[in-house]
Amino acid sequence: MAAVLVVEDEAQVLVLAESYLEEHGHRTFSAANVEQALAIIDGPEQIDVLFTDIGLNDNLQAGLELAKEAVERRLGLKVLYATGQAVTDGMKALFVDGSAVLQKPYTVEQLLTSFTVYFEINHKGDGRARSRDR
């Protein structure tokens, strides 16, 4: 299981993502903007994965900037981006190393598969992969 910081400016999407993850045994923290997310990153809580929308609060690249700052502050942090935009080569060039992207709208299965495939993180009742951190 993982501790996940979910950063999403659309309240309904934030609640759904958190509930998907919590139902499958993950611990979640939430933020609606970059400032709130960085406050959590700088706090004492363990965070394994940053799951952030790329476009936040009318800034189409805020999630990319957040991820870059977050991995500098927390070495080993894994990043999963979400976006409803087309992912361009220019956008991919701004992704942090080892990150992955999930296209919106996504299903619970797609979200959980992203954790398993890209980060080798187990979910409650899922014996397919082992977390590198455990």
Image (cartoon, rainbow, N blue to C red):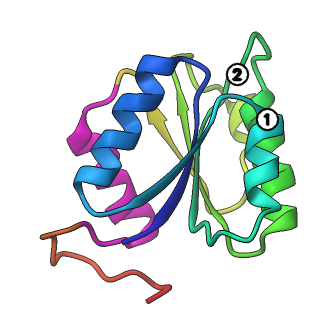
Q: Residue 14's spot in the image, x, y percent?
A: 47, 29
Callout 2–callout 1 Cβ contact below 8 Å: yes
Asked if 115 appears above or below 6 in the picture, the reply is below
Q: Is residue 70 left or right of residue 115?
A: right
Residue 91, disc: none
Q: Amino acid at mark 2?
A: Leu
Q: Amino acid at mark 1?
A: Val
Asked if 125 appears above or below 70 in the picture, the reply is below
- Quadrant (top left/top right/bottom left/bottom right) for the C terminus: bottom left
> Within 10 angstroms of label 1, few (less than 14), some, or many (20 or more) residues?
many
Q: Which element carries disc 1, helix, strand or loop?
A: helix
- Quadrant (top left/top right/bottom left/bottom right) for the N terminus: bottom left
**Viewer-nearest residue: 18 or 52:** 18
Label whose residue precedes the other's in the sequence (2 or 1): 1
Tell me the residue that label 1 is attached to: 34
Q: Which residues are magenta?
A: 106-123
Tell me the residue that label 2 is attached to: 56
Is residue 58 within the magenta segment? no
State the CA–CA distance, disc 2 to disc 1: 8 Å
> Within 10 angstroms of label 2, few (less than 14), some, or many (20 or more) residues?
many
Q: Main secondary structure of the magenta part?
A: helix
Q: Residue 65's spot in the image, x, y percent?
A: 83, 39
Q: Residue 77's spot in the image, x, y percent?
A: 67, 67
